[in-house]
Image (cartoon, coloured by chain):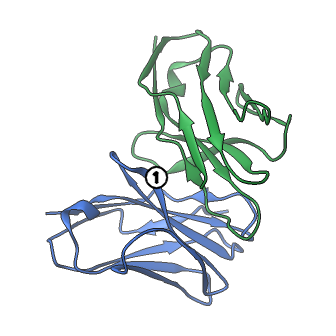
Chain colours: A green, B blue
């Protein structure tokens, strides 16, 4: 079955540091890949997505590239801000008739001023 | 455009009781999915509805059920509550099944 593995947290960075959160996946076929962010007390917000190999999703300074050869979708940001503190979830949705999202466990990011 | 709304936001129930949670999708969205979020298991898929039909179901016991109405609003029901059902229940809507999902703020259920 499908599965997503993302790096264990928590991750603590200083403002303006470089961020990488690793995500690898196992899936049949050609899944779509997503990063969601969850701020305290809120639901999930879609941060970025990629639907095919070598696609790069980007939003708000965050980027992730769909790497089929390494089955990875690592999240990166060049300079984090305090407001980026949240839990980040990597997710996939496989093709066919199954549209459910399969999520990683989440990575808590704390950015200190 | 209003986002996905879920009611109630917080709920406290006793073991053995039943509970109904409600989700109103974004206007025009026809698909609704439900997820359970717990610290131990993370985010797990419950079920997915499209045009009032359940299209997909996760690995949850039969105590968990749901439905979708003609206006796309959805409810999920949990009967005979157990302590382990304490979780954040998230609803997500999308235009069609294959479109990206937009999540609501969730209903925090506590079972005592």
B89 lies above or below B67:
above
A49 lies above or below B35:
above
Q: Secondary structure at mark 1?
A: strand
Residue at the image point whose x is 84% and y is 39% from the top: A53
**Spot occupied by residue B80 in the image (x, y as percentages of width and height):** 22, 79
Residue nearer the viewer, A4 or B30: A4
**Spot occupied by residue A72 in the image (x, y as percentages of width and height):** 69, 32
A30 lies above or below A37:
below
**Spot occupied by residue B98 in the image (x, y as percentages of width and height):** 75, 65
Residue at the image point whose x is 44% and y is 75% from the top: B22
- Assign the N terminus of chain B to one quadrant of the image: bottom right
Q: Give the residue at mark 1.
A: B43
Q: Is residue A19 left or right of residue A9?
A: right
**Spot occupied by residue A107 in the image (x, y as percentages of width and height):** 48, 32
Q: Numbered disc 1: what chain? A: B
Residue sitting farthest toward the bottom: B70
- Residue A89 visible: no
């Amino acid at each position: 079955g499908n599965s997503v593995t993302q790096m264990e947290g928590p991750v603590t960075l200083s403002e303006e540091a470089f961020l990488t959160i690793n995500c690898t996946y196992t899936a049949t076929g050609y899944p779509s890949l997503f990063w969601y962010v969850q701020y305290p007390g809120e639901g999930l917000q879609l941060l970025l997505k990629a639907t095919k190999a070598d696609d790069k999703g980007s939003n708000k300074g965050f980027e992730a590239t769909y790497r089929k050869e390494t089955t990875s979708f690592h999240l990166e940001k060049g300079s984090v801000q305090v407001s980026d503190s949240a839990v980040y979830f990597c997710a996939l949705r496989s093709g066919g008739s199954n549209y459910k999202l399969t999520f990683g466990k989440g990575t808590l990011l704390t950015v200190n001023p | 455009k209003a986002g996905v709304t879920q009611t109630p936001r917080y709920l406290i129930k006793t073991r053995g009781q039943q509970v109904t949670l409600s989700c109103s999708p974004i206007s025009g969205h026809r698909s609704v999915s439900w997820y359970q979020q717990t610290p131990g298991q993370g985010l797990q898929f419950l079920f997915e509805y499209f045009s009032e039909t359940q299209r997909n179901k996760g690995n949850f016991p039969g105590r968990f059920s749901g439905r979708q109405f003609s206006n796309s609003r959805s409810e999920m029901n949990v009967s005979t509550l157990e302590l382990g059902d304490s979780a954040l229940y998230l609803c997500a809507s999308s235009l069609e099944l294959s479109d990206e999902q937009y999540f609501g703020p969730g209903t925090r259920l506590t079972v005592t």
